[in-house]
Image: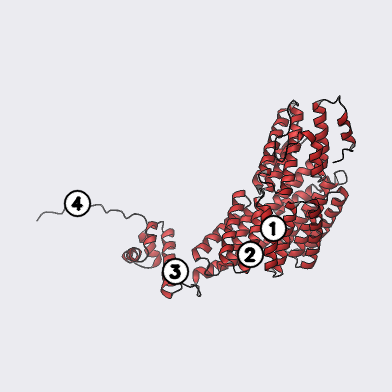
Amino acid sequence: MNLTDERLRGLDNPSLAPDERALLRSEVAADLIHKGRYEAAREALGELWRGIGERPNVEALSESTTAEVLLQAGVLSGWIGASKRAEGAQEAAKDLISESAALFEKLGESNRAATARAELALCYWRVGAYSEARVMLERAAASIENDASLKAKTVLRFAMVGTSAGRYSDAFYLLREYAPLFDENVSHTLRVGFHNELARVLRRLGAAEHRPDYNDRAIIEYTAAIFHAEQAGHEQYGASIENNLAFLLYKLGRYGDSHEHLDRAQIVLTRLKDAGTLAQVDETRARVLVAEGKYKDADRTLAGVLKTLERGDESALLADALTVQGVVWARLRAYESSINILRRAAELAETAGAYASAGQAVLTLIEEHGATWRMKPDEVYEAYVRADRLLKDTQEAEDLARLRACARVIMKRLAVAQFGGKNFTLPGAVHQFEAKLIERALDEAGGSLTKAARLLGISHQTLHSILDKRHKPLAGKRKPPQRRLKSIIKEPKE
């Protein structure tokens, strides 16, 4: 970086105290981070910066200055880590920012503490930990004092978390209520975020409420976001929004237009060497290719996406990409690999707290494999129960429609034996169906053999015999038989 910035010219002044020098570097770095110029921000921090996630050089600095340097080093670590998909970057960034927040709170600097909490929430959001991100934002909002820009940033991040967690109505209400915050008095970067997030919510609500006009509004909002990104000189942000717009156009079936916007984003991100955002662009392109039936092209595209995302901490993004890969492999008839990768996607997302992504992975597993012999009826049923649990709070119309469709798959599998399996026999199918009915009866009867027999319309002795001879694995479902007490009435002697 050429240190021609007016604020950095004073660094050559030998009379500058260490705190003054560190605060000057932090101030410039914060402004450059806000504009998306992360490498320039790293250079602006100079000797304070020791690497992504590394504790900065804060020896001999006051607590207040140390807190500021820790904050900028943490925020910058999070952004560069996301861009380069550096493993462990988000966890390290959280540690630095958390220490900064604690110092600011100790010093009574409530707005700076709130700023740190808002940045900490972003780190949690990146890894799919939406509940934790919401907690951080609630703590930030509670301590903001007369700072419109900070309030706008916090509102925006609340909406981001809400949208990602599937709480679209909440996010929409929040953005509408606080829209006046994002007028000409805030930076172009914050206005980019507002229009981008509003577009994301409109797309989801358009599907949920069957409002095609919301899609038109979303396109307008994305266009406004791109304009403000250009005004801010934030190329990475602009490329990310091009990707979001391409995703919407893909959902509308406008595949050619989608590819055009992805091409624009790819050119910018390749030049900027932003591997992380470029991976998201390629994942969107893979989805478009799947929709076009170009599975081999999608497979080649996803290979690079997964290689990049595997290096980082953003589990939700990785899980989404793995889910797309599962679809591609299913269509290419690599069935076992598809099943395994979809299960991994669901596990990864659920562990990270990204329940919507986990539920979508499980739905995909049922859609691609549940109606065939590749999954046993019990496995399909258990997958559906899991998806229903993971998506219990979703407002995504598409997910709800998919849940209903998968329920029909379950009913068909449980009601009718599937022909075509290599081990299918009529006696085997009858045996399997009998076991299912007995298991359900025992569950409903609380393990009572007598009550279960009554539900099945057979005698206690018959059910006991069936369990003993044909379904021994179900014996554990019944209550242990109770020994009958001997009569306390003695028989009279003759």
Relative placement, left or right, of 18 versus 492 is right
| Position of the N terminus by quadrant | top right
Q: Amino acid at mark 2?
A: Val
Q: Are marks 3 and 4 in contact (CB under 8 Å)?
A: no
Q: Nearer the viewer, residue 188 or 45?
A: 45
Q: Are marks 3 and 2 in contact (CB under 8 Å)?
A: no
Considering the numbered disc 2 on the image, is that residue within a helix, a strand or a loop?
helix
At x 81%, y 57%, the residue is 267
Local crowd at mark 3 within 10 Å, few (<14), some, or many (≥20)?
some
Q: Amino acid at mark 3?
A: Phe
Where residue 430 appears, as percent x and y from the top left, is 42, 72
Give residue 304's mark.
1
Q: Nearer the viewer, mark 1 or mark 4?
A: 1
At x 32%, y 55%, the residue is 481
Label 2, on which residue?
A: 327
Considering the numbered disc 1 on the image, is that residue within a helix, a strand or a loop?
helix
Label 3, on which residue?
A: 433
Q: CA distance from mark 3 to mark 4?
A: 46 Å
Q: Nearer the viewer, mark 2 or mark 1?
A: 1
Which numbered disc, 3 or 1, marks the residue that appears first in the sequence?
1
Where residue 358 appears, as percent x and y from the top left, is 61, 55
Q: CA distance from mark 3 to mark 2?
A: 30 Å
| Position of the C terminus by quadrant | bottom left
- In this rendering, is residue 366 above or below 319? below
Considering the numbered disc 4 on the image, is that residue within a helix, a strand or a loop?
loop
Local crowd at mark 1 within 10 Å, few (<14), some, or many (≥20)?
some
Label 4, on which residue?
A: 489
Q: Nearer the viewer, mark 3 or mark 2?
A: 2
Local crowd at mark 4 within 10 Å, few (<14), some, or many (≥20)?
few
- In this rendering, is residue 244 above or below 371? above
Q: CA distance from mark 3 to mark 1?
A: 45 Å
- In this rendering, is residue 223 above or below 5? below
